[in-house]
């Protein structure tokens, strides 16, 4: 397989992944399915006509509605649900059933009814319905409500896609690293609600070499998540293929510019550890350099080329050259990698967590295991920010050589 | 050819056409108001009139029957459905009469006969109008 075919495959797979996650939704209005549940034929027919720009499916009663919703082939994006229907199961009960099912509880429900009293309407909203549409039907109101809630739904789906991509792309199993008792590694990410684009990766090349990666892509939301998936895949492929950290960054940089028309950049740090000798070769593309922790309790920035934020982010300038650095990890030493979400974590009033606090924590806890260290730093940040929502992901990775 | 089939053959004409006039003088049905509110073509509107005619001719019997069986939830459901359907097509008096009975039941009123009589008259008027417009279209 030549490289263009390889990257075409990646792109095709990404497209498939998005289609799978979204159920192929979000392209045009006909791709939205709306389920209209009403025992009155006239109401169903009118709504079919009024909402003809969407795909409308109908049900005459609660049982039929629940059946239709369970059919994943035509799962609706929005449900217009009559409150009063014959046959025992009224709209409120149907809504309760929908909201109790994990797979379908996210589908917004709008009750459709002759104007009810406030008490009744409150009851419906408390069951989890998003709104009411009153009969007699007013076309403009129906169209506007439907449009608004579908937009909201799309936004929610986007957030799910993003979280899904980030979650499924990043490795989660840290232990046991195969055949290696002298290595301990842990990584943790505290994502923001909007997903800031952080990622990490680690994998073995053969039995002797462990590659580890940490990075942060530009932007937020779905485009950033897709770009993140591309970056992770390219880095993994190029590290494995070349075995050289500097060549890998150079290749990925060019590939992002030439082959991946997303026009975004990424900052990244990569290392390859020889697990028998402790030698680490590393290269940096505009990312914060890790700290080296020694058993005496000192934390210092990793020496070597590629300073913090030196403007060599990948995906900006073609044919950028990257330099490799080399250190020997002695037994008991550890590397601590972090994204800028750590130092830029901000509390109310604007104070940032900063490098000093990070160094202090690392030096005080240098003997701790990677897992304790990673979780400890995130906890320390949470205490510092006192739960203030952060605008960027916070990601840490620790690697100890024994 | 059934009413429905003949209607389907009619081209759906936008609201602001001269056809709208043929719905204008229906007793008990505010067709113009309904068309403005629904913003559907006359064909769609005529079809919902037809559906109303077909589905609600025997609703009074059903309501009376449920009342005899003292099945209050069923009575309320029937009234609610009728009120919604009537409101949609602009059968304003039917809509009001049905919802008034609903309120009367909620308030515990025992003698519903006069109110049901009112509803029956309003409904018959509306159904007659629908029937007349159907035969005109035929």
Image (tube, rainbow, N blue to C red):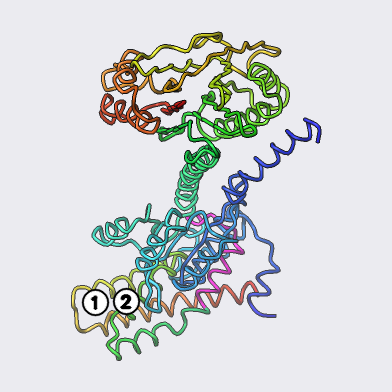
Mark 1 in CB contact with mark 2 (< 8 angstroms):
yes
Q: Residue A239, image x and y in percent?
A: 65, 26
Disc 2: host chain: B
Q: Which of B80 and A181 is in front in this view?
A: A181
Structural crowding at the residue carrying mark 2, measured as other residues with C-alpha within 10 Å and reported as few (<14), some (14–19) or many (≥20):
many
Say which residue appears at 38% left-offset and 60% top-offset.
Answer: A99
In this view, B43 is above or below A77: below
Quarter-wise, where is residue A75 in the image? bottom right
Distance of label 1 from label 2 (alpha carbons): 8 Å
For the stretch drawn in magenta, the main secondary structure is helix
Q: Residue A281, image x and y in percent?
A: 58, 18
Is A226 in the magenta?
no
Say which residue appears at 40% left-offset and 30% top-offset.
Answer: A370
Residue B76: which numbered mark, if any? 2
Please give left or right for residue B10 compared with residue A339 in the image.
right
Q: Residue B32, image x and y in percent?
A: 50, 59
In this view, A54 is above or below A36: above
Q: SS of the residue at dot 2?
A: helix
Quarter-wise, where is residue B15 in the image? bottom right
| Residue A70 can be seen in this image | yes
Q: Residue B49, image x and y in percent?
A: 53, 70
Is B41 in the magenta?
yes
Disc 1: host chain: B
- Magenta-tinted stretch: B36-53
Q: Nearer the viewer, residue B18 or A118?
A: A118
Identify the residue under disc 1.
B105
Please give left or right for residue A17 compared with residue B108 in the image.
right
Q: SS of the residue at dot 1?
A: helix
């Amino acid at each position: 397989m030549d490289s263009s075919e390889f990257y075409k495959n990646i792109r095709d797979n990404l497209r498939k992944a998005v289609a799978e996650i979204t159920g192929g939704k979000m392209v045009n209005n006909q791709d939205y399915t709306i389920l209209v549940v009403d025992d009155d034929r006239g109401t169903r027919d009118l709504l079919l006509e009024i909402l003809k720009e969407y795909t409308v499916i109908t049900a005459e009663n609660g049982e039929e509605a629940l059946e239709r919703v369970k059919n994943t082939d035509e799962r609706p994006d929005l449900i217009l649900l009559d409150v009063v229907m014959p046959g025992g199961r009224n709209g409120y009960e149907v809504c309760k059933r929908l909201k109790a099912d994990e797979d379908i509880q996210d589908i917004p429900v709008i009750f459709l009814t002759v104007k009810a009293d406030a008490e009744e309407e409150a009851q419906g909203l408390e069951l989890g319905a998003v709104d009411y549409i009153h009969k007699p039907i007013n076309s403009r109101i129906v169209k506007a409500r439907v449009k608004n809630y579908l937009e909201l739904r799309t936004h929610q789906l986007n957030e799910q896609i993003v979280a899904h991509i980030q979650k499924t792309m990043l490795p989660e199993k840290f232990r046991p690293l195969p055949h290696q008792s002298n290595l301990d590694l842990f990584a943790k990410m505290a994502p923001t609600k909007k997903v800031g684009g952080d990622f990490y990766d680690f994998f073995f090349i053969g039995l002797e070499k462990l590659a580890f990666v940490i990075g942060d892509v530009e932007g937020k939301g779905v485009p950033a998540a897709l770009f993140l998936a591309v970056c992770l895949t390219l880095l993994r492929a190029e590290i494995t293929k070349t075995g050289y950290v500097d060549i890998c960054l150079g290749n990925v940089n060019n590939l992002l510019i030439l082959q991946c028309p997303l026009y975004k950049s990424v900052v990244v740090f990569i290392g390859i550890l020889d697990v028998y000798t402790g030698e680490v070769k590393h290269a940096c593309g505009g990312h914060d350099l890790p700290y080296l922790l020694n058993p005496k309790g000192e934390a210092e920035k990793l020496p070597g080329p590629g300073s913090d934020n030196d403007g060599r982010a990948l995906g900006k300038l073609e044919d950028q050259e990257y330099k490799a650095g080399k250190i020997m990890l002695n037994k008991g030493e550890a590397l601590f990698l972090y994204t800028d979400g750590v130092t830029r974590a901000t509390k109310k009033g604007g104070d940032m967590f900063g490098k000093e606090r990070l160094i202090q924590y690392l030096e005080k806890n240098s003997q701790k295991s990677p897992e304790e260290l990673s979780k400890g730093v995130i906890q320390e940040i949470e205490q510092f920010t006192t739960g203030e929502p952060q605008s960027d992901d916070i990601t840490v990775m620790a690697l100890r050589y024994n | 050819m059934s009413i429905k089939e003949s209607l389907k053959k009619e081209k759906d004409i936008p609201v602001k056409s001269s056809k709208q006039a043929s719905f204008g003088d229906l007793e008990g049905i505010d067709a113009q108001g309904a068309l403005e509110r629904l913003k559907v073509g006359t064909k769609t509107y005529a079809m919902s009139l037809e559906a109303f005619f077909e589905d609600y001719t025997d609703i009074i019997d059903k309501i009376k029957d449920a009342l005899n069986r003292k099945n209050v939830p069923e009575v309320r459901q029937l009234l609610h459905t009728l009120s919604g359907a009537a409101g949609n097509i602009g059968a304003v008096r039917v809509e009001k009469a049905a919802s008034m009975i609903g309120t009367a039941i909620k308030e515990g009123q025992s003698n519903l006969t006069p109110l049901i009589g009112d509803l029956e008259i309003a409904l018959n008027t509306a159904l007659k109008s629908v029937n007349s417009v159907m035969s005109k279209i035929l």
